[in-house]
Image: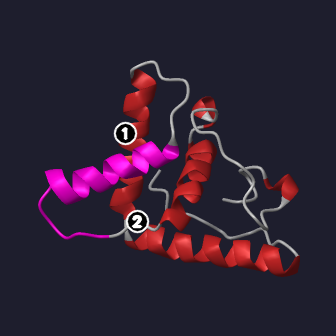
Amino acid sequence: MSGLEHPLEHRSSGAQGLLFEQKKKEWWEWHKANPQVWDYFERFSMEAVSKGRKKISHWLIINRIRWEVNIVTTGEDFKISNDHIAFYARLWKARHPQHKDLFTTKKMIGEPIESGVKNVF
């Protein structure tokens, strides 16, 4: 699965909910424009799983991506906003439920309590 199918189906109420929805929408647009980030995120996360890791930081994965793109590879640089990191962990949980506990996530400001992963993605 490419990680590009996202129906933005759930809406939160209140100002904080609107802020959450706006951040989610901004992330989703950036994600669609930069699918290589999800490819790296998935690859490096699966590498950790294959090495027996039960828990790992999604920040660690993103920083490894930053390293790969900025130091190891040659090509166009791009910036990954820190605001996007939590959404990648949530997408992982949605796409890889068998490894949903790999990343610990906290409720984001404005995120619906009942959202779980299904309503966020």
Residue positioned 26% across, 51% down in the render: 67
Residue that label 2 marks: 80
- Quick one: label 1, few (<14), some, or many (20+) residues within 10 Å? some
Residue positioned 41% across, 51% down in the render: 62
- Quick one: label 2, few (<14), some, or many (20+) residues within 10 Å? some
Residue that label 1 marks: 44
Q: Secondary structure at mark 1?
A: helix
Residue 46 % position (x, y): 42, 33
Q: Which mark is residue 8?
A: none
Instruction: Give how far apart the Cα atoms at labels 1 and 2 are.
Output: 16 Å
Q: Is 15 rendered above or below residue 9?
A: below
Q: Earlier in the sequence, mark 1 or mark 2?
A: 1
Residue 73 % position (x, y): 15, 55
The quadrant where residue 16 appears: bottom right
Q: Is 20 rendered above or below residue 117?
A: below
Q: Is 101 rendered above or below residue 37?
A: above
Identified by mark 1, the residue type is Phe
Residue positioned 88% across, 75% down in the render: 13
Colour scheme of the rendered structure: secondary structure
* 74 displayed left or right of 100: left
Is 61 one of the magenta-colored residues?
A: yes
Magenta residue span: 58-78
* 84 displayed left or right of 44: right
